[in-house]
Image (cartoon, rainbow, N blue to C red):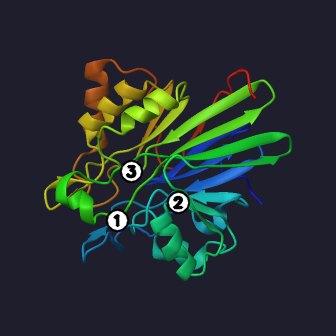
Amino acid sequence: MPDGTAGSTAECAVTFVGTATTLLRLGPFRLLTDPNFVRRGQWVHVGHGIVTRRRTNPAMTIDELPELDAVLLSHLHGDHFDRVAARELDRALPIFTTPHAAGRLHKRGFAESVPMPRWSKWSTTKDGARLTVTSLPARHARGLVGVVAPPVMGTLLDYERPGHRLRLYLSGDTVLHDDLHEIRDRCPDIDLAVMHLGGTRILGHLISMDGQEGADLLELLRPLQALPVHHDDYGLFTSPLSEFQVEVARRGIPGVEWVLPGMTLDLPLPARKTV
């Protein structure tokens, strides 16, 4: 089966598929994030009777994916887990997600969904390497919209083999809030931050970071590299990637990678002491 990372031979790499969907290769592990495979012009539901139309196509189909070890799902909205994913993904795949989403996925036949309360961890080993998944703070919105929005989680991925560790942060659809400071304090040395942007708005309230908030979070966490995703894909996205680019340039934030759908970013594997 093809590897799915666009010909890259690096031990670790990320392929941007579109929206918040990425394919992660971490040594022997293959992980898919927030699977969104509907086509341009199709509609998805984002809750409470609200729908939005896709403006882009995914860079690959589910049939073109390699054999997966797991899916990482930040929350259960139609632009993160759509009807194509529900129909075509292997129901035996572990899906690491919020307890809210895991319960709903169980009812839809995804029996291996794993509920991840905040700061819970899950680890596995394969071919001498270890992967640890940690659920991190995230909040879909502030104020009253935040009360009715579904729970969201960020994710920390630690890929380790003797003498080396790569640390990835997946923001999920969060807005800025005080609990994100816990990530800075408890999870130093982030190598790559995958940032969900787009400035999605419902009833005038942000439910994902716009360009300014995305830059603010990078200044808080200071990852070595950052990959913006979840932008320009849907009609509800009000903050284009260009706004984030302007903020990054104005503040002189280093390490931001501009990766188009279908492109693969190789990730260096730092030499670090491992447990």
Q: Residue 102 carries which label?
A: none
Q: CA separation, marks 3 and 2?
A: 18 Å
The quadrant in which residue 236 appears is bottom left
Query: Contact (CB < 8 A) between labels 3 and 2?
Result: no
Q: Can residue 6 be seen in this view?
A: no
> Which mark is in front, 1 or 2?
2
Q: CA separation, marks 3 and 1?
A: 12 Å
Element under label 3?
loop
Residue that appears at 25% across and 21% down: 250
Is residue 242 shown left or right of residue 188?
left
Dot 2 corresponds to which residue? 97
Sooner in the amino-acid sequence: mark 3 or mark 1: 1
| Front residue of this view, candidates 145 and 79 | 145
Residue that appears at 34% across and 65% down: 54
Q: What residue type is labelled 2?
A: Thr
Q: Can residue 21 be seen in this view?
A: yes
Dot 3 corresponds to which residue? 230
**Coordinates of residue 41 in the picture (x, y in percent):** 34, 70
Sooner in the amino-acid sequence: mark 3 or mark 2: 2
Q: CA separation, marks 1 and 2?
A: 23 Å
**Coordinates of residue 164 in the picture (x, y in percent):** 74, 26
**Coordinates of residue 188 in the picture (x, y in percent):** 52, 26
Q: Residue 54 carries which label?
A: 1
Q: What residue type is labelled 3?
A: His
Instruction: Note whether 84 is above or below 58 in the view shown.
Output: below
Q: Which amino acid does label 1 sit on?
A: Arg
> Which mark is in front, 3 or 2?
2
Residue that appears at 74% across and 56% down: 2
| Front residue of this view, candidates 237 and 1 | 237
> Which mark is in front, 3 or 1?
3
Count how many numbered circles sit on residues in the image: 3
